[in-house]
Structures are given as structure tokens and as C-alpha cells.
Amino acid sequence: MKIPVLLATLTVAFASPLSAGSLIFSGSFANTNPPAASGGRCPSLTVNIGNHGPFYATGSSNLGAFTSVQSHCLDSGPPIAVGAADTPYYDGRFTYSFTNGGSLFGTYSGVLSNSGVASVIDNVQSFLVTGGSGKFAHARGTFVGTGDIRFLGGPPTASLTIGESVLAVPEPATWGMLIIGFTATGLAIRARRSTVPLHLAT
């Protein structure tokens, strides 16, 4: 029963490391959202961004148009006044859903800095893509967004430019080989165990 184990091991080894296709991603994003508020998932203040009620969160990219659902945490309000200290935000979670199918999701963090103009805030965000769905399944990578947020009456409005980045998307054939390899390994181990003689105590 050693042959199935050897074959299964070779199958897994052949499929690893993952061969990945490259996916270029760049674009822009705009949103309005309610002000940061207490009582959400964050210990202090939570910002929720998405298409709900009078608010919107939409983007365009080389991969097509998308909508976003995301949220992040703040420990203090944004630096609206000139000379105010920078405000970092953290524990961001995002999902970009593309109108032509598939999604990207992951985490992000950033820093808000007053631009030198009252009520206009510079915004720098760092994103970590941890996965996706559809044609972006198992995507991995990072990208950076830069833009501003304006508090000029009414809900804050934000714009973001997403710098060009390269995301890794494993090829479907690779995942197929991995699944076959792990399945064969499991079956081989089970077969080996079933042949172990049973010794009864006398």
C-alpha cells in the first residue's frame, strides 16, 4: 500500500507552490457616508460606508465598475481644523463587488491629515486583499489609495485614487491539482490504516 501514498505525495508536490496569474488593478472610488459614530463594532467610533439610504460608495477600475461595503475604526474624530493632529484609523474591512461579476475583499487601515484647508482632509489608505469570489477567487495582494474627504456641509464626501497594483490570482488548474492531491493523500492514508493487523490481548 505504499504506492498510493507515493503517488499522492507527488501530486501535492507538483501542485505546490501555487502557480499564480497576475491581475492588474487600478481605479478610483467615491463615497458619502454618515459621520463616525459610537455603538458600532469598534471600541470607540465606527465609520460605515456603503450604498444605503442617501449614501453611496461606487468606483470604476480597469476591472470594471464596482460598489463597496466597508467599515473601519477611529479613536477620535477626523482632523477638520487646520493644525489638528493626524488621526489614524484601523481594523478596516472591505468588499468590492464588480458589476460584471466577482469580488475582492480584505482589510485596510489609513491616516487622516488636515490638508491645510479647514474641513478638507487628506486620506491615505493601505489595503490588503485576502481573497475574492468568482474570477477573483483566492486573490492576494496589496494596493494603496490616496485622496481626500470634505466636510463642507451635509454628509462628508470622499474621493480616492487607487494606485496601480499587481494582485496574484491562483489559476483554476492549480487548485484542481491541489484538491486531487489532498484527496488522494487522505484515501491512501485511510487505506494504509485499514490494513494494520489487529492484535487481541490474551
Image (cartoon, grey):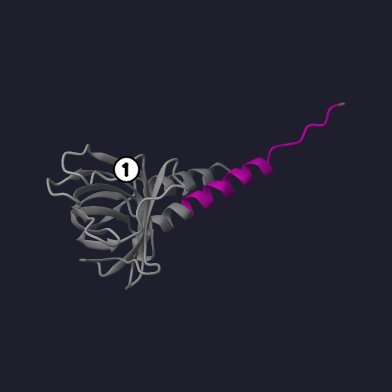
How many numbered marks appear? 1
Within 10 Å of the Cα at label 1, are there few (<14), some (14-19), or many (20+) other Cα atoms?
Answer: many
The residue that appears at 44% across and 44% down in the rendered structure is 42
| Quadrant assignment, res 24 | bottom left
Say which of 81 and 1 sits in front.
81
Q: Position of residue 61 (x, y in %)?
A: 22, 65
Percent position of residue 168, x then y? 28, 53
Closer to us: 38 or 143: 38
Magenta span: 180-201
Q: Quadrant of the N terminus?
A: top right
Q: Which residue is mark 1?
A: 89
Q: Quick check: is 163 in the magenta stretch?
A: no
Does residue 192 belong to the magenta stretch?
A: yes
x and y percent of residue 196 in the render? Answer: 69, 38
Image location of residue 105, percent across then percent down: 36, 55
Q: Is residue 4 left or right of residue 25?
A: right
Vertical placement of 60 versus 122: above or below? below
- Seen at 42% across and 55% down, the residue is 177
